[in-house]
């Protein structure tokens, strides 16, 4: 079974299950959980390599080791 179909089936299972819940406290807990999950900071979702690269760039910028936009244009041409 392909992943998209598995995802759709899981969503339908959850919708069906959720429609049977009558406990308001439980529904509120689910709602709070969803709300917390949706508010995650993007920085919590990146890899260690991405985080290290960003930190390195910040350190270089703080130390004044920056290249002007014209230099980036020279290196990368029309890709930017």
Image (cartoon, rainbow, N blue to C red):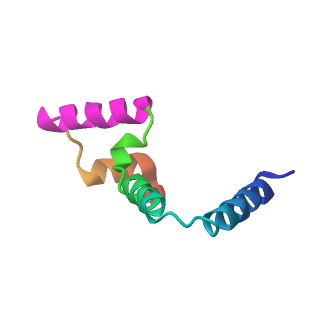
Using the image as rendered, state which of residue 29 and residue 51 is in the foreground: 29
Using the image as rendered, state which of residue 20 and residue 50 is in the foreground: 20
Residue 31 located within the stretch drawn in magenta: no
User: Where is 35 relative to 40, above or below?
Assistant: below
User: Where is 11 relative to 50, above or below?
Assistant: below
Q: Where is residue 19 drawn, in percent x and y?
A: 63, 70
Residue 53 located within the stretch drawn in magenta: yes
Residue lying at 42% horizontally and 56% vertically, measured from the top left: 29
Q: Where is residue 61 drawn, in percent x and y?
A: 18, 38
**Residue placed farthest to the right in the image?**
1
Range of residues picked out in magenta: 48-65
**Residue placed farthest to the left in the image?**
63
Q: Tell me which secondary structure the magenta stretch mostly adopts.
A: helix
Q: Where is residue 50 drawn, in percent x and y?
A: 41, 36
Name the quarter where the C terminus is drawn: bottom left
User: Where is 36 relative to 53, above or below?
Assistant: below
Residue lying at 37% horizontally and 49% vertically, measured from the top left: 42
Quarter residue 64 falls in: top left
């Amino acid at each position: 079974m392909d992943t998209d179909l598995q995802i759709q089936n899981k969503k339908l299972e959850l919708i069906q299950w959720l429609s049977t819940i009558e406990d308001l406290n439980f529904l509120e807990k689910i709602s709070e959980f969803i709300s917390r999950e949706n508010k995650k900071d993007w920085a919590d979702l990146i890899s260690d390599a991405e985080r290290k690269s960003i930190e390195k760039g910040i350190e270089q910028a703080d130390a004044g080791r920056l290249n002007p936009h014209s230099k980036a244009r020279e290196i990368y041409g029309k890709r930017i």
